[in-house]
Structures are given as structure tokens and as C-alpha cells.
Image (tube, rainbow, N blue to C red):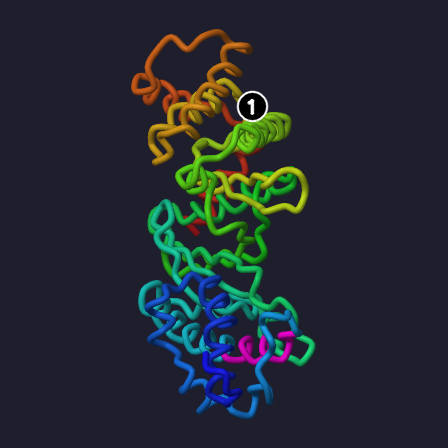
């Protein structure tokens, strides 16, 4: 940036130092960001909002006015993108999703989820109330999941019910809102839930090599999840490293751990042995094959051996054995009645 404190240079400060953090938080690539905005376009449209002089970044002077300007620009762009996604969802799922979001704004598509659901990043309505006192806007993304259920019509509704059960015990994201729109034999489910860190545990372990202390904390986190789940008499049914979300903490532990994706879950007597085998079996399914993988594999194997004895077969041979055991797990009779009521609903 040039030394001259010109309006264009002040627009450049907003563009480079503030807006990019917001766009990155929404999951946009740098290429998309650069094509969307430039300092000259910001200056032309938001000239009245840009503060009269640039902040001294080196001396750490307040950036509040520049932040408010960046929030306003990002909010305007996000609302335009939201309208495009609402139109796309209407074309794809045949629903007006805006009526079911309680003011949340869709900013990006994350990708396809299990059982043919589609995931989006959304921000809450409070983030878009920009004022001179705005602070730390657009930091808390939520997740929107939309799914058509063409056969039974109960899949995501039941999954959301189970997720609420897990949340009561502190081991799942909170479901904020849910709607289930029925048209004929098709039920379209719209669910907004809490979003934790951008990456799952699997992604973090596939990144840089962690210290022994950090990996010990990972192991303790997994053991804690199993303890809480079994105490609550819940079965996840798809325990693996990509289905463990992360909540960043300011304490001694780097993260708190939350389970994700409850399509295979059920209220039933938890089998800790089975869940441990599933975590071990899926180590090789993810890309953390170096120090992180070997360290955690040893910790889990030793933990398993202390409780149940040595594992006598290869992970490949565990695959069908583990999943057969999951699929034939006996469910609580009360929950069977609950499932029957859902089936009746889907046929109505």
C-alpha cells in the first residue's frame, strides 16, 4: 500500500486485511473473492462508509470503523449469494427454503452429505444487524442440511431426533431448527444445526504432525465420547475420524469433541468393544498414515487389549464383522414404537 492516505488506499485496507477473513470464514476461495470485489469497486459503492483515514496497523490502533465497513460490504454480498442459493434450492428440492430458515442466510455450499443430503454454511439473522457497535460479526457459522426422502420419508427426521438425544449428553451439535415439508410421498427435511470448527478430527490428523501430548488429548477425547455415549445407552453406528467434529477451547485441551452424522444411530445398549474396533478399522480409511496414525493406533490397541484382550484378526476381516454387529443390534422396544409412528406418518 502506498504511503498516501487516499480513499483508494483506505478501500485497499478493507479489501486486504478485513474482508478476506470474512470471505475465508464463509468457505470462499481466494479466486472467487478476488473476482467478487476490488478496492476500486468498494470505493465506488461504499465511499460514504469508508472511514476518513487509514488505521495504523503496525501500532495496533482501533480498526472498529473499518471492521463495520467490512461487515456491511460482506453482508451485502452474502445476501445476494443467499438469493441465488434459495433459487437453486427451489429448483432442486421444489421448496421455498427461505420460509424455514428463521432469518438465517445461506452463504456457501459445503458439499454432499450422507444419504443424499446437501450441506450449506449459514449465518444467523443477528449477524446482519450491522451498527457502529458491531463486534466479531460472522464468526459463528451454522450448518444447513436439506434432504429429500423419497422412500420412507422419515430418514432425516429420525436422524435429527437421535441427534437431539446425543446433544442432551453433550456429545453432538445442537439442532437449532428443523422443518419437514411433505408433498405426496416425498418429505423434504430442512435442518439448521450448530457448526463447530471447519475441520473434522480426521482432517486435523491428516495435517501437520501432532506432539505426543496433543495425541494423548485426542485419545482421551475419544475415550470420553465412548464413556458418555455408553452411559447414555446410545449407539452411533458409524464411528470414524471424519464423524468427530471439533469445538475449539481456550483451556488446556486444544479441542472438545462432538459426534456427527447420526444416520446409523439408535438408542440401544452401547457396545464399547464394537465402537473401539470401528475406530481402529477406520484409521486406514483416512490420510493420516504417519506418526499421528501409528501413535493413535498403538494407544487404541493397548486400550482395547487391557479391557478385552489382543485383537486376533486383521482390520480387513473386521469390516463385515463390525458392521454385521451394528446392523443386528437390539433396539429399545420403546424406540421401535417410536419408529413405527414415523412409518405411519410417512405413509399418511
Would residue 113 be visible to someone looking at this image?
yes
Q: Taking 193 as reference, is 301 above or below it?
A: above
What's the magenta bit mostly, secondary-structure-wise?
helix
Task: Specify start and end residues of the magenta stretch as a single range.
Answer: 62-73
The reply to whether residue 332 is in sight is no
Residue appearing at x 51%, y 91% in the figure: 47
Where's residue 89, x and y in %? 37, 66
Q: Magenta stretch: residue 300 in it?
A: no
Q: Residue at coordinates 32% horizontally, 21% vertically from top-left? A: 320
Placement of 99 over or under 263, stated as above or below: below
User: Which residue matches tag 1?
Assistant: 269
- Asked which secondary structure carries label 1, the reply is loop
Judging depth in this view, the residue of 117 and 48 nearest the camera is 48
**Quarter of the rendering containing residue 205:** top left
Q: Is residue 6 left or right of residue 28?
A: right
- The picture places residue 268, in percent across and down from the top left corner, at 54, 27
**Pointer 1 local density, CA inside 10 Å: few below 14, some 14–19, many at least 20:** some
Residue at (61% x, 78% y) in the render:
130
User: Residue 57 location, x and y as percent?
Assistant: 58, 72
Q: Position of residue 331 (x, y in %)?
A: 51, 27
Amino acid at each position: 500500500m502506498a504511503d498516501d492516505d487516499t480513499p483508494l488506499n483506505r478501500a485497499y485496507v478493507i479489501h486486504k486485511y478485513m474482508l478476506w477473513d470474512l470471505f475465508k470464514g464463509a468457505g470462499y476461495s481466494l479466486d472467487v473473492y478476488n473476482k467478487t470485489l476490488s478496492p476500486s469497486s468498494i470505493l465506488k459503492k461504499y465511499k460514504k462508509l469508508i472511514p476518513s483515514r487509514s488505521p495504523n496497523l503496525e501500532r495496533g490502533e482501533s480498526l472498529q470503523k473499518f471492521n463495520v465497513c467490512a461487515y456491511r460490504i460482506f453482508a451485502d454480498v452474502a445476501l445476494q449469494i443467499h438469493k441465488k442459493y434459495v433459487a437453486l434450492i427451489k429448483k432442486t428440492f421444489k421448496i421455498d427454503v427461505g420460509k424455514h430458515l428463521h432469518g438465517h442466510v445461506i452463504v456457501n455450499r459445503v458439499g454432499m452429505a450422507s444419504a443424499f443430503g446437501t450441506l450449506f454454511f449459514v449465518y444467523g439473522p443477528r449477524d446482519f444487524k450491522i451498527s457502529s457497535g458491531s463486534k466479531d460479526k460472522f464468526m459463528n457459522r451454522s450448518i444447513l442440511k436439506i434432504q429429500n426422502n423419497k422412500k420412507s420419508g422419515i430418514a432425516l427426521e429420525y436422524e435429527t431426533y437421535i441427534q437431539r438425544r446425543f446433544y442432551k449428553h453433550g456429545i453432538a451439535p445442537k439442532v437449532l431448527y428443523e422443518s419437514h415439508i411433505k408433498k405426496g410421498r416425498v418429505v423434504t427435511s430442512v435442518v439448521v444445526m450448530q457448526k463447530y470448527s471447519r475441520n473434522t478430527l480426521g482432517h486435523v490428523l491428516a495435517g501437520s504432525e501432532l506432539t505426543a501430548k496433543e495425541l494423548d488429548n485426542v485419545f482421551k477425547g475419544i475415550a470420553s465420547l465412548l464413556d458418555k455415549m455408553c452411559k447414555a445407552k446410545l449407539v452411533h453406528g458409524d464411528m470414524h475420524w471424519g464423524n468427530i467434529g471439533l469445538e475449539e477451547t481456550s483451556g488446556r485441551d486444544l479441542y472438545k469433541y462432538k459426534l456427527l452424522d447420526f444416520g446409523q444411530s439408535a438408542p440401544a445398549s452401547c457396545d464399547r468393544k464394537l465402537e473401539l474396533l470401528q475406530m481402529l478399522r477406520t484409521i486406514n480409511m483416512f490420510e493420516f498414515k504417519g506418526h499421528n496414525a501409528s501413535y493413535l493406533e498403538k494407544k487404541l490397541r493397548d486400550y482395547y487389549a487391557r479391557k478385552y484382550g489382543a485383537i486376533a484378526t486383521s482390520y480387513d476381516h473386521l469390516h463385515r464383522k463390525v458392521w454385521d454387529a451394528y446392523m443386528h443390534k437390539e433396539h429399545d422396544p420403546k424406540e421401535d414404537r417410536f419408529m413405527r409412528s414415523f412409518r405411519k406418518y410417512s405413509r399418511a
